[in-house]
Image (cartoon, helix red, strand yellow):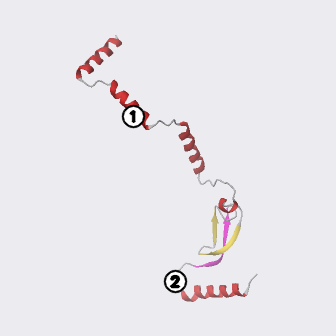
Amino acid sequence: MNTALDVLLKKALRHIITSVMKKGIHPKYYPQAQVACACGNSFTTGSTQPEIKVEICHACHPFFTGQMKYIDTMGRVEKFQKKQAAAQAKKYVKKTDRQRKKTQAEKAQPTTLKEMIQLQKKKAKLKK
C-alpha cells in the first residue's frame, strides 16, 4: 500500500541521495537490499550491500519470540557448558581452610638446624 506519504518520502530520499551527497566518496546505496536469515526469513531494507546474510533476525531472536534458544557460533555453547561442568566438579575450599592447612604444613617443617639434622637422621633410619 503506497500512500501519498510513502511516495513523498521515497522522492525525498532519492533527492537527498542524488543531489545533496558529494559525488564519488559514498558507496552505492541499494534501497531494495534483501536480508536473508539462517531461519529462512527474508525481508527488504536499504543498505550499501545488495544482499545481506544474518544468523538471527526479528523472527527467530529469543527477545522477540520469548523462547529460550541457544545460538551456537563455532561450538561456544558446548565450550561454556564444559567449563561449567568442570567448575561444578571441582570442590571449593574456603580461604580459611587453605590458610589453616598451610600453617599446619609450616608447623610440621623444622625451623632450626638442629631439628633439620634430627629429621634427616630419622629418615635415614627408616630407609634402613
Residue extending furthest right? 1
Residue extending furthest front? 96
For residue 38, what is the image quadrant? bottom right
Residue 107 screen position, x and y as percent: 33, 26
Residue 122 screen position, x and y as percent: 31, 14
Residue extending furthest top? 128
Q: State which region is magenta.
A: 28-37
At a point 26% along the width and 20% down the height, the residue shown is: 115
Q: Main secondary structure of the magenta part?
A: strand
Q: Is residue 13 above or below residue 37?
A: below
At a point 66% along the width and 85% down the height, the residue shown is: 9
Q: Nearer the viewer, residue 75 or 69?
A: 69
Residue 34 in the magenta stretch? The answer is: yes
Q: What is the three-letter code of the residue carrying label 1?
A: Gln
**Residue 75 at least partly seen:** no
Q: Quadrant of the C terminus?
A: top left
Q: Quadrant of the N terminus?
A: bottom right
Residue 24 circle label: 2
